Amino acid sequence: MMARFTALMALLLTALTALPATAQNGPLRLEITEGVIEPLPFAVPVFVATGNGAQAAQDISNLIAADLSGTGLFREIPASAHISRITSFSSPVQFADWKAVNAQALVTGSVDVDASGGLTVQFRVWDVYAGQELGSGQQFVGTAQGWRRIAHKIADQVYSRITGEGGYFDSRVVYVSETGPKDQRAKRLAIMDYDGANASYLTDSSSLVLAPRFSPSGDRILYTSYASGFPKIYVLDVASVSRRQLPTQDATMSFAPRFGPDGQTVVYSLEAGGNTDIYTMNVGSGASTRLTSAPSIETAPSFSPDGRQIVFESDRSGRNHLYIMSASGGEAQRISNGDGNYGTPIWSPRGDLVAFTKQLQGRFHIGVMRTDGSEERLLTASFLDEGPTWAPNGRVIMFHRETQGADGQAALYSVDITGRNLRRVPTASGASDPSWSPLQ
Amino acid sequence: MNTGQIISGAGHIAVIGWILFGGMLPERELEFDVTQVTAVSSEEYADIIARSNSPEETSEIAPPAAPEVPQDSPDLTSEADEPLAAPQPEAAPEAAPDPAPTAPPAAPQADVSPEAPVIEPPSEDMAALLPDSAARPQQRPAERVAPQQVEAPEPDTAVDDVVREEAVPDEAPSEIVREEAEATAPEAAATEIVTEADEAAPLNSVRPRTRPQQLRPAPEEQPAPEPETQTAAADPAPAPATDTSSVEDALAAALGGASAPADTPAPSINAGPPLTAGEKDGLRVAVQSCWNTGSLSSDALQTTVTVSFEMSEDARPIEATVRMLDSTGGTEGSAQQAYEAARRAIIRCGARGFGLPAEKYASWRNVELTFNPENMRIK
């Protein structure tokens, strides 16, 4: 019987396997569901220099490469490995030479500095393996002193053409510069390029300043100052470095301000009578509207990119959690559900994520979650990580990290929303409370 | 329900029932067949037992002597084991954690190798060159040589029971001429017997091509160069030049049928044998290894694109044929980014060839790959 059963099964298997073996109609179809996640190799040969542009060509090429490499999404192929040399901006690219060194993207350009110091930079981006240009060539014109900004703009273009999302290199960061020991720390506002270059101070250290926040257009900065003895909100014009205090009630403390997406509305926290609630204010008229009235502490509000909702933190449940409510107030919905204390939420410029600080078991984390509280993931962990701020493209988060002990220093760090590419942002002194500007 | 269906159903039920239950009863009968009993007397039994025991032999063969050898050195083995076991677990944890964070910097050196990535794939030409260098065996002497040279070779005459007239290949295409190779010379007319070793077999072995006419039944005719029936090599005239133009033609004729006219329309390019699951997995894994989604935007990671391309016979994608067929789940811009990443994967990993079986070229000449980044999204 067993032999018969085996024979029958063999017959069935033969019949089944013979069916697809008869012929294959149409192309071979496969589904690719797994890939690799690794930096994309690229090459930026030194731009072709004309006029007095030799040094500028070298500097601009290097900065573009540094911008792209700093994202963690790209990996520069060093010039020592290049086979081809770009001697003319208009010459055809020898793609085989760049394929040979595994360069998948290629940036070529030319730099010209005229006698008056005018700087003209042209560039092209190439998909080496496709053997064609990504986008079309572009040209930037500026002054020789502004070469860094032109390089950042070119890097933004390259980033955008390869990844399909906007860059963040031509942006600035305002932060609190800290000097001195912890118990006598002097703090003042400072502003710099996203990579730490061109730093300058916006205020002196005569009074304590906290939590600077860029406006959506990047031309103004909100911050909290103790100049009057109480924390009050000020707005500072970046171009003129002039400032004014926003009108608030006497004998109250106002803090944690952020601009709304319209640039005219400010949402902030106000403490009065031992209770802290969230308010909005029109910057022009100074008219305020109270949004919450719970006896608990509600603070750290942040608008959604469309201005229709506000995420904030509250201890109404006994521990600090994140809540979302309408921009006009009303009932709030809790979105954080994990253990620990959640704070300082900030809505992603894309609108899909909320970054936050989480304190759990004695350690601080920077994390992100969906706006409904799902898919929470912690990106960092240290003695003290706080104050997340989003890059203009919503791909990178900058925050400050403070080391332990009396001599502990605060420093700025950036991390990709995947949790990779954690990098320290260079600053001349200690730095905290960063706020990332939009693209300039 | 018609009668045919009833009969068919009854027949199937009967067959299945016979397969499942019909074998039960015969099994019991078989038990009786295998039982055999032989009467043995007590003396014979004692004699058998005495011979089978053979106590002297077993005591000599007994390997206890061998175990005594290790007994002499138990101390050595036990001492040697302890130091071996100790260092192994200690070395592992030290090496593991450090390389992990420093792995990314090491990667560039490998990728920036100046060596050209293009490696010549195994091609038909290479296979054809190999046999030339192989030493041919020594020719055996002719078994019989005619005492005199036959002055008038009559190539058209043959020894056969049936008298047939030779078909003159006046305007016939090559495939008809091949069939006329059956013409044989009279045995007495040959100056020598050409053995198979002396026969002008093709020196080159060519990788078989795809079956060009798989759907057409294979002809019964043998290929033109039939060593056993061919006359002496001294008859070059009757053999048309077109008949032995190339070995590939002969193979094609053998595989595809010599009777097919030359102007027969090419068969469907997709009519070849299908790839096995392993071969498909090989292609899939090869493309996956080059599908880099690390630089894709979140929107592009939401976009599934289907890319089609054509491959040459050495299993390399033809770059000009790569194009996006379809995209779902994203914007036009994100679809373009996703497509470019997919195209890079195909071209980059296909530059060395995907190593697909050449005999199944028709099965993988046209390929459609769907790149689904669902598992690659940021989570």
Image (cartoon, rainbow, N blue to C red):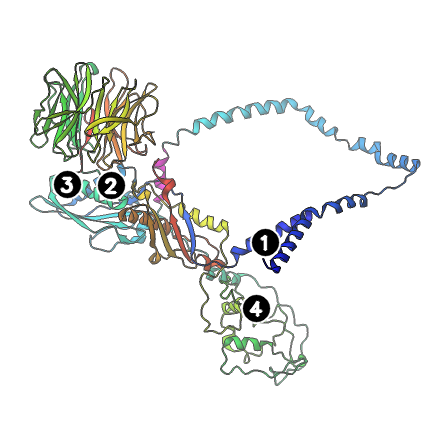
Q: Mark 4 belongs to which amino acid?
A: Ala
Q: Which residue is mark 2?
A: A65
* Front residue of this view, candidates B337 and B372: B372
Around disc 3, counting alpha carbons within 10 Å, would you say few (fewer than 14), some (14 to 19), or many (20 or more)?
A: many
Q: Main secondary structure of the magenta part?
A: helix
Q: Chain of mark 1?
A: A
**In the image, is residue A87 part of the stretch drawn in magenta?**
no
Query: Residue at the spot x=53%, y=77% of the render?
Result: B176
Q: Which residue is mark 3?
A: A147
Query: Residue at the spot x=56%, y=62% of the render?
Result: B135
Q: Which residue is mark 4?
A: B201
Q: Which residue is mark 1?
A: A14
Q: Chain of mark 2?
A: A
Q: Mark 1 belongs to which amino acid?
A: Thr
Q: Is residue A412 above or below residue B279?
A: above
Q: Mark 3 belongs to which amino acid?
A: Trp
Mark yes or no: residue B326 visible.
yes
Mark yes or no: residue B116 visible.
no
Q: Nearer the viewer, mark 4 or mark 1?
A: 1
What's drawn in magenta, residue-wise?
Answer: B102-112
Q: Chain of mark 4?
A: B
Q: Mark 2 belongs to which amino acid?
A: Ala
Q: Are marks 3 and 1 in contact (CB under 8 Å)?
A: no
